[in-house]
Image: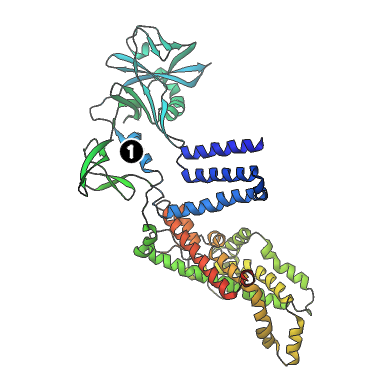
Amino acid sequence: MLLALFNAGIVWAGVFLFQNAYYELGIVLLTLLVLIDFFVFNPKAYPYRYTIPALILLFVLVLYPIYFTVKIAFTNYGTGHLMTRQEAIERILFDPNFTYVPEDSTPVNYMVFSVYEGLKPTEDFLILFEDGGRIFLAEKPVVTKKSGNEVLLRESSLFSVKEGTVQLDGTTYEFVPWPVSSLEDVDAITSNGKVYKPLYSPDDPSLKKNEPFFKVNIAQKHLNRAEFWYDDQMLMLRISESGKWYFYPVKRLYSLSLEESFENGKIVTKLVVKNNLTGRKLAEKDGAFYDYDRNGKEIFVVGYMDYIGFKNFSRIFTDPKISGPFFKVFTWTFTWAALSVLFTFAIGLSLALVLNDRSLRGRNIYRTLLIIPWAVPAFISVLVWRNGMFNETYGILNRFVLPLLGLEPVKWFNDPFWAKVAVLTVNTWLGFPYMMAVSLGALQSIPEELYEAASIDGAGRWRRFWTITFPLLMTTVAPLLVGSFAFNFNNFVNIYLLTGGGPAMAGATTPVGHTDILISYVYKLAFEGGRGQDFGFASAISIIIFFLVGGISFVNFKLSGAFEEVSE
């Protein structure tokens, strides 16, 4: 039963994803479903049943994100380029923003009728229009085009009222009274036991009290992106210069047109988008449509996600406003990761050597106290350092410590050098307990006989350290140091919480600061860009980071022989 429900849920999710053009994720889910059913129903695949949870997580949280990142890196996906080309064309053709009211047009008189529950109007409404001495009835517009959950277009038709009745799809609307000379003379419209009473008209002062309900519950919910058709005439709700909401005859600004061109010795017919006012076709390039103003200057209309090859990667090297900051971030990322490992290991090892001395009394107490920074959640420690220690106005360092030493206050977050000192200090504080714990464990694994033999040979403390302790220690901790380097290479939290990557780097066209490392730079590009989000460029840098970290880790592991026993 549970398996049947699971299958039904996954199939429904897969169909939903396909219907919304998420083909890759739909394929992933359906592939998972096939594998899971195979593991469950095939007796020979019985052991693999226990891998199903890991398989699901592997597909959904690892493989698909990797595929999606690689795919996005070769596109212009980002702010202004979030939809497909088909969706962009539909938006150009149907979005009310791409319509216009002809200069000689006048507003059409209308009145909204609603079903009341007691004295309270409802959203069950009809609209009467008066044009050329004739009265027309329109029902609530229905959604005819959507993009995901976003409504692109609602439509309704106008039907002429003859002899006081209108019949629509088996529903008869009767007008009370009839005949009438204007909309204001209609007291009610009845249909199937419902009674529609006057709700709103911009020119009827007696209905002014219902204006808020009309604007919030009728106009914004049901008349937004709504078209009312009569023959070839389209009416849409617009706000007049007087501030009143009227229906106007509206024309679409753009339409599709076929154009023939001669390419590669052949006549090719293309579907192009044309401006109905100027008769000029829109330019299409770099994943976007452009119109032209009166001076012939291109105007961005709408963009869509398009394949752009290696353009995101080449931007790093060809655009000086990107390459300059990028290589500064690149250099600082290596420096940050290396110094973080060096400082944490040096301090952690020094403390471990002290705490490993058996003559030291209260070693367990010292170990407990020194492990506390590791036990406290990192984000809490970072915020304490940021607001309590490094705050430039009331922080302990600037307010008490530095004046006590006769030094000027330091601009911890506004000077590039001191900002880097601050992030390294905090990271050292957070990282040395881990190195101390690792070093303590490694020190206790070194046989005492080696030290005794060295002492008999006359080796001093430093000699024993450099010839026995350090080499044997490194065989144990070297892989951990490589792992720590890779961790700090992507240590986003400390940088982002402490300085936010700042201070800002002057002259850069992308959001970047002097303490930004590559991963925080990627985050800003993807989610905090001043000109919008640039997922494509951020994905390209993510791929570079992946190969950098992977390459560095591989080389270091090979040099340190960390996997020597595994390979054998």
Q: How crowded is mark 1: few (under 14 residues within 10 Å), some or many (20 or more)?
A: many
**Which residue is tagged 1?**
92
Does residue 121 appear anywhere in the picture? yes
Measuring from the top left, give residue 316's x and y in whole percent.
39, 63
Residue drawn 61% across the image and 42% down it: 37
Measuring from the top left, give residue 119's x and y in whole percent.
52, 17
Residue drawn 74% across the image and 67% down it: 368
Three-letter amino acid code at the position of disc 1:
Ile
Number of marks drawn = 1
Does residue 502 appear anywhere in the picture? no
**Vertical position of residue 195 compared to residue 525: above or below:** above
SS label for mark 1: helix
**Vertical position of residue 92 compared to residue 539: above or below:** above
Q: Quadrant of the C terminus?
A: bottom right
- Name the side, left or right, on which 114 lies relative to 50: left
Measuring from the top left, give residue 52's x and y in whole percent.
63, 48
